[in-house]
Image (cartoon, rainbow, N blue to C red):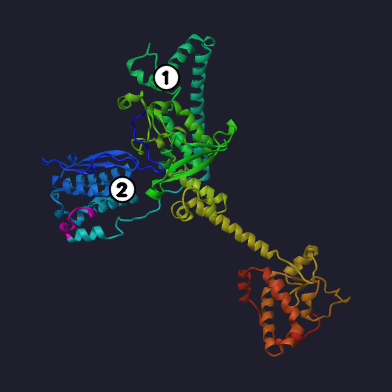
């Protein structure tokens, strides 16, 4: 029977350690007065240690160690390894800068505003404005956590508490890629992914042939098959070093490992393609778990990590579609995830990582660090900030920007591109476009400042306005229940030129009135005549006519007015004016003429 404690579950209390539990200290202060040590353990289990003995200015060590511990400890605001390291780098850079001054401060009481301003100026010399302000923000947050705030110089305390010079500084980041750039990136990544898949598939095929039909292989292939079998069984790379110089051993090991395992250089195209296919941010992709669930072989359910949502909402389940056709393996996110799971399965068996990512890294320092696992490791288990050499990868594939310069590769820009492309595909409807964020977050952080989205939106708006104008200007109303489509083109053109105008319409055939012969009816009779046409150019007169009818209502009894003009009023206000846009009616108001009331009673024929 296993000696492991029972797992917690419904109706069972969680196992707790015996005796009194004391939380291990975040800040260690040696009794002999040595430099303090700050230990960090993140919510994801990643750890790191920061030693102040590396820094000058011993008089500042203890105060800043307490501040750093408060910021990255269990109750602090920085709970990931990357954020904790960023805080430490701010302390380190600040101390090194102060140490170069002719009279560096010896304690926190001697810190001055000019020291903080110099720090910002120095950061601006080596990085962009956004990064410089972010570095200053980290330093100011640390200084807010210094013990004994009353010891700070009053001007320094005021500066630290102010906003606008670093704290909560916002600045638009780089935009996404254009459609051409994105297609080139995805094509390059896809070609590499196919090569990785086929390479490992070829090694697996040779291994299976050696294990089941060794007699069908040549002598060289049998030897290679034996080495692959030993690699698959032990995880350790087997190389025939005969005829190789000592300096060629690492390259030979690397080449042999590639036959069955994913290696470090494969991570770049795999992550680039994953970002373009899923639209997820780099941190989430690097923490893809190996654990998953297939749903009727049509989708794969995976639990993703997104820590920026806060601890309570840091995990979410997604369902990625799976295409049963092997030829479409790289078309859907679910099929690609299963491909990643399969090609790194052997390596995961030795590295024992819970992540889907597992590589062979047994050369150089990796041979020492990963000796117990035969060189296998989860590349993002210790830290997420593993260098991927994206610039080198883009250069190898000859990727260039729309300006002709070498393309600047960033996974975050790929995510922005996917957000923008999705928004365009759904016509800009953000609730439908959102992939990983709320509609508000997608707009504020991914779409609002993107020049390609701005250009697209301007084109869509221009096209919409043009279509609306063309549609509106093409409106030709034929009154009296007749079909406007039967009006001859030459009549339309003459009506549009104003050659057929009556009072507030055009007459398509004045020589053949409703009663036969040349029309001699009142102008108001046009609104019930099948010969009458109404175009946009008649809007000013129509609006003026409605004003005149309102005035006439004031001098008549309602029943009398309704009997005389009720039908005309209904036709104009309900059948004609609603066919034109508010903008058209607003423009027509500025040009409407003034019609005398007497016009309603005559003349009875066209002048």
Picture coordinates of residue 85 (x, y %)?
29, 43
Residue that sits furthest to the right in the current view: 516
Q: Is residue 146 magenta?
A: yes
Q: Quadrant of residue 463?
A: bottom right
Q: Is residue 361 magenta?
A: no
Quadrant assignment for the C terminus: bottom right
| Image vertical order of residue 553 relative to residue 137, above or below | below
Q: Which circle's residue, 2 or 1, is located before the other in the chain?
A: 2
Nearer to the camera, 277 or 555: 277
17 lies left or right of 398: left
Q: Which mark is residue 421?
A: none
Q: Which residue is mark 1?
A: 233
Tell me where the magenta segment starts and ends, as one range: 143-153
Nearer to the camera, 303 or 511: 303
249 lies left or right of 300: left
Q: Quadrant of residue 32?
A: top left
Picture coordinates of residue 136 (x, y %)?
28, 52
Circle 1: element type: helix
| Residue 574 visible in the shown view | yes
Circle 2: element type: loop
Picture coordinates of residue 210 (x, y %)?
50, 14
The residue located at (22%, 50%) in the rendering is 67
232 lies left or right of 45: right
The residue located at (69%, 75%) in the rendering is 573
The residues bearing labels 2 and 1 have C-alpha atoms spaced at a distance of: 42 Å
Q: Which residue is mark 2?
A: 78
Picture coordinates of residue 285 (x, y %)?
43, 40
67 lies left or right of 283: left
């Amino acid at each position: 029977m296993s000696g492991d404690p029972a797992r917690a579950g419904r109706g069972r209390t969680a196992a707790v350690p015996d005796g009194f539990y004391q939380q291990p200290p975040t800040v260690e202060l040696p009794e002999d007065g040595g430099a303090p040590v700050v230990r960090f353990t993140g919510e994801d289990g990643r750890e790191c240690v920061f030693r102040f003995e590396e820094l000058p200015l011993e008089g500042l060590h203890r105060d800043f160690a307490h501040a750093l511990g408060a910021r990255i400890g269990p109750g602090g605001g920085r709970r990931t390894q990357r954020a904790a390291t960023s805080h430490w780098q701010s302390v380190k850079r600040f101390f090194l800068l102060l140490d170069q001054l002719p009279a560096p401060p010896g304690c926190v009481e001697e810190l001055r505003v000019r020291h903080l301003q110099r720090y910002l100026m120095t950061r601006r010399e080596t990085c962009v404005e956004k990064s410089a302000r972010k570095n200053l923000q980290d330093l100011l947050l640390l200084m807010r956590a210094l013990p004994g705030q009353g010891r700070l110089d009053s001007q320094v305390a005021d500066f630290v508490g102010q906003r606008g010079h670093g704290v909560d500084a916002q600045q638009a980041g780089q935009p996404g890629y254009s459609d051409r750039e994105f297609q080139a990136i995805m094509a390059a990544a896809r070609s590499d992914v196919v090569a990785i898949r086929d390479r490992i598939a070829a090694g697996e095929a040779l291994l299976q042939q050696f294990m089941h039909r060794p007699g069908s292989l040549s002598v060289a292939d049998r030897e290679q098959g034996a080495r692959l079998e030993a690699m698959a069984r032990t995880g350790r790379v087997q190389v025939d070093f005969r005829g190789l110089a000592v300096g060629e051993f690492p390259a030979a090991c690397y080449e042999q490992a590639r036959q069955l395992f994913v290696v470090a250089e494969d991570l770049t195209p795999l992550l680039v393609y994953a970002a373009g296919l899923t639209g997820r941010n780099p941190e989430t992709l690097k923490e893809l778990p190996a654990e998953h669930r297939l749903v009727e072989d049509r989708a794969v359910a995976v639990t993703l990590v997104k820590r920026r949502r806060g601890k309570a909402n840091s995990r979410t389940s997604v369902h990625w579609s799976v295409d049963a056709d092997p030829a479409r393996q790289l078309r859907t996110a679910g099929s690609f995830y299963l491909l990643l799971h399969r090609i790194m399965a052997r390596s995961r068996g030795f590295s024992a990582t819970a992540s889907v990512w597992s590589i062979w890294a047994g050369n150089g320092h990796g041979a020492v660090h990963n000796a117990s696992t035969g060189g296998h490791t989860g590349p993002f288990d210790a830290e997420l900030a593993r260098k991927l050499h994206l610039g080198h990868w883009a250069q190898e594939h000859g990727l260039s920007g729309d300006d002709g310069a070498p393309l600047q590769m960033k996974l975050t820009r790929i995510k922005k591109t996917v957000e923008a492309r999705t928004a365009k595909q759904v016509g800009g409807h953000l609730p439908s476009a959102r992939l990983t964020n709320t509609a508000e977050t997608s707009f504020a952080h991914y779409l609002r400042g993107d020049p390609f989205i701005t250009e697209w939106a301007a084109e869509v708006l221009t096209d919409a306005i043009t279509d609306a104008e063309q549609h509106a200007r093409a409106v030709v109303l034929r009154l009296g229940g007749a079909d406007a489509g039967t009006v001859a083109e030459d009549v339309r053109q003459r009506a549009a030129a104003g050659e057929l105008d009556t009072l507030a319409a055009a007459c398509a055939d004045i020589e053949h009135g409703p009663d036969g012969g040349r029309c001699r009816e009142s102008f108001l009779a046009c609104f019930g005549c099948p010969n009458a046409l109404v175009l946009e150019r008649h809007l000013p007169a129509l609006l003026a006519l409605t004003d005149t009818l309102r005035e006439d209502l004031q001098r008549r009894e309602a029943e009398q007015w309704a009997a005389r003009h009720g039908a005309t009023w209904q036709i104009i206000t309900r059948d004609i004016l609603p066919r034109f846009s508010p903008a058209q009616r607003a423009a027509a108001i500025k040009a409407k003429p003034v019609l005398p009331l007497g016009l309603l009673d005559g003349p009875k024929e066209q002048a």
